[in-house]
Image: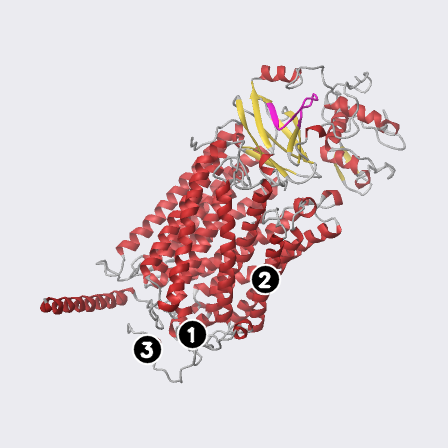
Amino acid sequence: MSAVDIRTEEAPRHAPQPSYLQNGHTIKSWLLTGDHKRIAILYLISTGFFFFLGSIAAGAIRWQLTSPRGELMTLEVYNKMFSAHGVIMVFMFLVPTIPAVLGNFLVPIMIGARDLAFPRLNLASWYMYMVGGVLILVAMAMGGVDTGWTFYTPYSSIYSSSQVSLTLVGAFIVGFSSIFTGLNFIVTIHKMRAPGMTWDRLPLYIWSHYATSIIIILATPVVAITLLCVVLERAFRIGIFSPELGGDPVLFQHLFWFYSHPAVYIMVLPGMGIISELMSAFSRKPVFGYKFIAGSSLAIAAIGFLVWGHHMFVSSQSMYQGLVFSLLSFVVAVPSAIKVFNWTATMWKGSVRLQTPMIYALCFMGLFVVGGLTGLYLSTLATDVHLTATYFVVAHFHYVMVGGTILAYLGGLHFWWPKMTGRMYPDSWGKLSAIIIFVGFNLTFFPQFILGFLGMPRRYATYALAPQFQFYHILSTAGATVLGIGFLIPLFYLSWSLKHGPKAGKNPWGAKGLEWTVDSPPITTNFYETPIVDRPVYDYDPEEEERQFQIELDAEREMREKLAATRGGQD
Amino acid sequence: MNFPIRPEAASNFATEHDQLFFTITALTIFFTVVVLTLVVIFAARYRAGSKYSRANASNHNTKLEITWSVIPLLLGLGIFVWGAKIFVEQHTPPKEAMELFVIGKQWMWHVQHPNGVRENNTIHLPLGRPVRVTMISQDVIHALYIPEFRVQYHVVPGRYTTFWFTPTKVGKFHLFCNMYCGTQHAEMGGYVYVQEPEDFEKWLENDGTKVAERTPSLAELGKALYDRTQCGNCHGQVDNVRAPSLIGLYGRQRQFTNGMSGVADDSYLRDSILNPNSRVVKGYREIMPQNYKFTEEQILQLAAYIKSLGAAASPNPVTPSVDAPMPTPNTPAPSGDPTSHNLPGR
């Protein structure tokens, strides 16, 4: 097999077209675009904005907790702050971000399509997202919500006097943006694959989006109706959840977690898809166990629907429900373990390149393994009875959501940034940011495992009853500061790269996959002509890659020696 | 400033929990170290340009896949069984357990001992005796959490929940609300005091913290309320045409007019007081008034009185029997919530 990928070397047979970024410069051309890539950029900016807001709330929370008496905010403001953090991060960032930004940009290109199946539905999804987001922000401006992102009844439906209804309506509308995206992906992946792009040649990133989309369209309507029921009970006192009105408060938890546990997989599966791409591309080796990784995504999507009750072991659901949900939770852990082992095996005998996206992927491995394994404590009945709703849970899901999803997102963003913008960023700055984030993250959240084991409840504005927790809270706040700096660094060098970064070319990483055969940034229709896929996915040969690497290395050394010789001659 | 790494272990479940906890911790550390060591080794050893051979690098190995699926699954199932065993035990209170009643409300814990002693935001318990806690909320969902005991359970409006434990250490432990319940959630807590049994008896006899005349027991308070509400007009010594007698009711199997049947437990009693038509006993009509407004404290008192009229399991009625003269409560019957003056800043 030749080392040169003929597809990338293909001489242009068509008159060059402007890239999607150059094709129209008016605001209207952006706000009314049907181009999946432009919609991805709209999402990139808007999810980034909400991530920034959610991070500020997180900072305020951490600052408050440096002292047992909470010097910064009143109880009420603190409660609104952690609710804002949760609502924004979950509904406005973690759920939409990878599908709507990287998924939107890449799903059509990776399967050889010109766009998603329903471009206008795609645009509508962004508008739904924005309308919902604005409603949530208006609710915050009008005083905010103090129920936490979980909206447990009857507190949310009867007792809270904060802006619950408006926030719920906002979340309800944002849910539709997810549904639209999920629907679009499923149809696109089924109907618009290029000739030769068979199911077993689909990149694992596409498989993970496929599994995610199934979860989205099955689970999101349930939470949408549930949230609406809370609004109905609040506004018209229709008894659904409040026992005073004849309702059942625990029913809400069942309905809520029926969505919100699968939602965890909505948040993390696309991240896992990114890691599969990164591990393969930067090990220059086909993903180990392709079928098992693809199958594990589907298994997670299916079993993930059957474990919601593990959030409710002490909620007054029956003991037998507890037993069944615990058992199934151990079963759903296995597909995630399979993925981790296969990613590790992918590096074996690879030709590993430690560039920025790979550093992010390795940091992901470190954090996701801990996040996944600490889930065992919470699916085990007896230990969950002690640990549920403590900082142990907070630490666990931040390891999965931040350590997993956000690190994978950043890894993916750094991987496909040259494709999206046509520019490279400085690799050393990228690596530095990944390492700062990794260190800051562990410093923030590892102490929280100990706090939880000691019995520190979550959602406490003060802990005057137990001041011995202070040491760990201070460590955690120090870590959050480092983490915040780590998140800011990419903002600067990525913005810098837009103007000053070196041009990337079609395939700056030497990676396989259809997205690396098109222009950077791609033209509006992605491909000049429909590609034909005639080879397996992840068609890397590590031995050949090594030979190539040696040749490049030798050429570089020769160049350097020649340069040194000429310089020596001048002296 | 101190940095503890392990909470005190002060109940029968604490040691069991910690053994399981540290076993999972060992597994977590083992798998983390194995995976991350391999990741680091592979990244270093197979870094581009290294001398190691890349020949025969395979991309799949079904035997390997099955191995690393089955081993974690089996380990997981082992942990599941262990955790489930303790959980089932946590749901099976011993028969001889002493009773304790807890009412959660924004933002305080109201605790009632069977003999009538009450306390707010503290719980006094004797060392070494199993305690069965029956809980209900007056407003939103709370959770009673005692980390040193490794137990917690939700306190839900509209239904009783129970859990149990045996304190195994004398001392002062934390009492938290661990389900977000509104503005002062973080302040809804206090301490659990475990005392030597004799100290606890002394504490109980002296009416908790203050030395005063003996307070009436829960059942006595219930009897007073029962009389004041004139429940006896219908619920007499024996079943009559209007209503069944309540003697020996608690714990008995009941047949209902809707064809269902069930045991007369705490939830049934509460339900039948607040919402009598939901389950009417076979042979009776829906004539009981539905407009009784009782606080959760009062319902617990009525239930305690009904229980004192004899339980199906133990034929000997617990004192006071119906024929014995009822002691008059020395606190004048309050019209509202007897503890409302203790509510913080509402």
Task: Identify the residue under disc 2.
Answer: A217
Give the distance between the C-alpha atoms of the residues marked 2 and 3, in whole angstroms. 40 Å
Residue A360 shown left or right of residue A462 in the figure:
left
Residue B163 in the image, given as x and y percentages of width and height: 61, 32
Which quadrant of the view contains residue A477?
top left
Name the residue: 63% across, 38% down: B142
Foreground tag (1 vs 2): 1
Q: Earlier in the sequence, mark 2 or mark 3?
A: 3
Find disc 3 in the rendering and name its residue. Answer: A9
Q: CA distance from mark 3 to mark 1?
A: 16 Å
Answer with mark 1 or mark 2, whichever residue precedes in sequence: 2
**Marks 1 and 2 on same chain:** yes
Residue B271 lies, with reference to residue A526, above or below; the image says above
Q: Residue at x 64, y 35 (%)?
A: B107
Q: How many angstroms separate mark 1 from mark 2 (CA)?
A: 30 Å
Q: Which mark is residue A522?
A: 1
Dividing the picture into quadrants, the one containing residue A242 is: top right
Considering only vertical position in the picture, is A114 above or below A410? Answer: below
Do the numbered discs 3 and 1 sit on residues whose CB atoms are within 8 Å?
no
Query: Mark 1 falls on what kind of element?
Result: loop
Q: Which residues are magenta?
A: B111-124
Specify how the rendered protein is coloured. Answer: secondary structure
Apparent side of residue B179 relative to residue A5 in the rendered image (left or right): right
- Which quarter shows the C terminus of chain B? top right
